Every structure is written in C-alpha cells, then in structure tokens.
Amino acid sequence: MDALHIIARRAPQFQPRIAVVLGSGWGGLTDHITQAVQIPYADLPGFPQPTVAGHSASLWLGYIGAQAVAVMGGRKHGYETGAVDGMAVPLQVLKALGCHTLVQTNAAGSLRADMPPQSLMLVTDHLNLPQCSPLVGQTGSARFVNMVDAYDIELNRLAALVAIEKNALLFEGVYAWFLGPQFETPAEIRMARLLGADAVGMSTVPETILARYLGLRVMALSFITNFGAGMSGEHLSHAHTLQQAQMGSAKASQLLADIIARLPQT
Ligand code: HPA
C-alpha cells in the first residue's frame, strides 16, 4: 500500500483512531484539527481525485480534542464513475494506520415535514436502494457482512448525549441511498417515505458497507439541506445544496467536533 508509506513518512509515528469522511457542508471540521498535517489526495495513490465542487481533496491528520483523527476532506461517489468501491483503498489505508471507527457525514434531503433544512440527523440505519455493493467481486465468507447494527448503537447513544449536553437538536432516522447524480423524482421521494426512509442522499452507504467489512465501527451524520423533491416549492440543485450546507457548516462542525472528542479511544 503505497499511500500508507507516504502517510507514515509525512506524519511519522502518528496513529489515528477515528477516520472521518466529510461531505458537503462539513468542511468546517478541519478548523477543529490541531497539529494538522494536510496531504493532498494527488499525493496518495488510490485516494479519490474528487470531481465534485464543494468537496476538498486532502487527507488531514491531527487531533480533535485528545482524539487522534484522520479526516478525509472529500469522498468518491458512485455517480462519478458507476463504480461504488471508490473508497475501498482509502478505508483500507485508514484501517491499516490504526483507525477502529469511521465517522461519516453527508448532505441529505429530508422526507419529514418536522425535519426542515438546517437540521442534523444521526443515521440509525440505511436503505441501499440501488442494491449495489462495493463488495461485489470479493471472495471468502467475510464478504457476507452482517448489517444489523451497522450504525453503532453505543456510538449513536453517545452522539445523542453530546447533542443534549450542547443543547443541539439532533434528529435520528433512516438514510436512503439513491445513486444520483440526478435528484429524485417526487414519486421516488414518496416511495422512499413509504419504505421507511427519513432522509435521502447520494453517498455514505457504500462506505458503511466497506467499513463494516473491514471491522470498523460506523457512525453517520446527515446535514439536511432541503426537503425531498416535490415536498416544497424549492428548486433543487447542487448550488442550492452547497449554499444551504455553507449556512449551517459552523454549527454542524462544532457539534461533530464535540462528538468526535468524546468517542471511545480504543
Ligand atoms: N437528494 C439526494 N441527495 C441530496 C439531496 C436530495 O434531496 N440533498 C442533498 N443531497
């Protein structure tokens, strides 16, 4: 793993425990990293070269509170190439560096009238609607990953507790993955709601599957940028997602930093 050697050379002896993937609107988290070493993805073989505006292309190593973290400023999405295993190498590298937990973030559309734009939602479960897996092609019995409690109950309890302590409203719900890049139709949004989803988005699920395959604990947070298609008069666009995400970025990143600082270190 070339990337592993490059990281070890740039951040000697550093052992991150918590891997973090930043989605749209969560970039402010990097302001909370101390003793930061920033490595452009361009220097890291196998890391994604993002094509999506609003996603940064660096790995950050450092501390949030006392927690040693490896923060990926951007991710590879299934809709960029059709392949859904674009995060396999980075997650393998972060696990090999010492990470035992993956904290994911994303921007998402809300399916609930009581969860408006600017809300934060802790993901308790997901719907893999495209039924695509980054594990296709793996061999051996480890590929049959148990997805019960894929989103770690203990970590979610901790996140909910931190939110209460910080007086922040944190919804909980099911995240439905649509491949994208087009937004959903109103009929698809009604379908997702009927199936039990609370939010929709175009990421996160492949990484959760990969992380569980690697034995990492997973937590995921959604920043709600809009209501699902057809639920309000909003015109959905990537620019709208980014604008909404930017508005709430500081608050979301503060809560995320508070949660990360409190996660189990081992
Ligand atoms: N749908 C899919 N992905 C999204 C949305 C949405 O409404 N909002 C932000 N990301």
Image (cartoon, grey):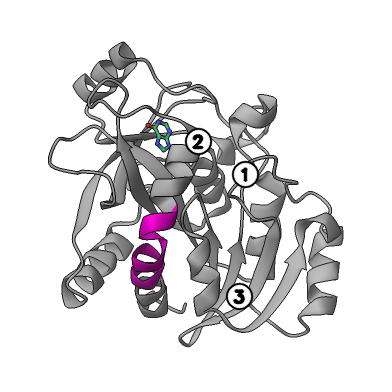
Sequence-earlier tag: 1 or 3? 3
Q: Are marks 2 and 1 in contact (CB under 8 Å)?
A: yes
Query: Crowding near pointer 1: few (<14 within 10 Å), some, many (20+)?
Result: few
Image point (32%, 45%), residue name: 224
From the Cβ of disc 2, is ligand 1 less than 8 Å away? no
Q: Which residues are drawn in magenta?
A: 246-256
Q: State the mark number for residue 53.
A: 1
Q: Is residue 14 left or right of residue 265?
A: right
Q: Where, quadrant-wise, is the N terminus in this rendering?
A: bottom right
Query: Crowding near pointer 3: few (<14 within 10 Å), some, many (20+)?
Result: many
From the Cβ of disc 3, is ligand 1 less than 8 Å away? no
Q: Please, is residue 27 above or below residue 199 in the view? A: below
Ligand 1 rendered quadrant: top left
Residue that badge 2 annotates = 238
**Residue 215 appears at what percent x and percent y?**
52, 55
Q: State the mark number for residue 16.
A: 3
Of the residues shown, which amino acid type is indicated by label 3? Pro
The mark lying in front, picked from 1 and 3, is 1
Cα gap from disc 3 to disc 2, whole angstroms: 32 Å
Residue 72 covered by magenta stretch? no
Cα gap from disc 1 to disc 3, whole angstroms: 27 Å
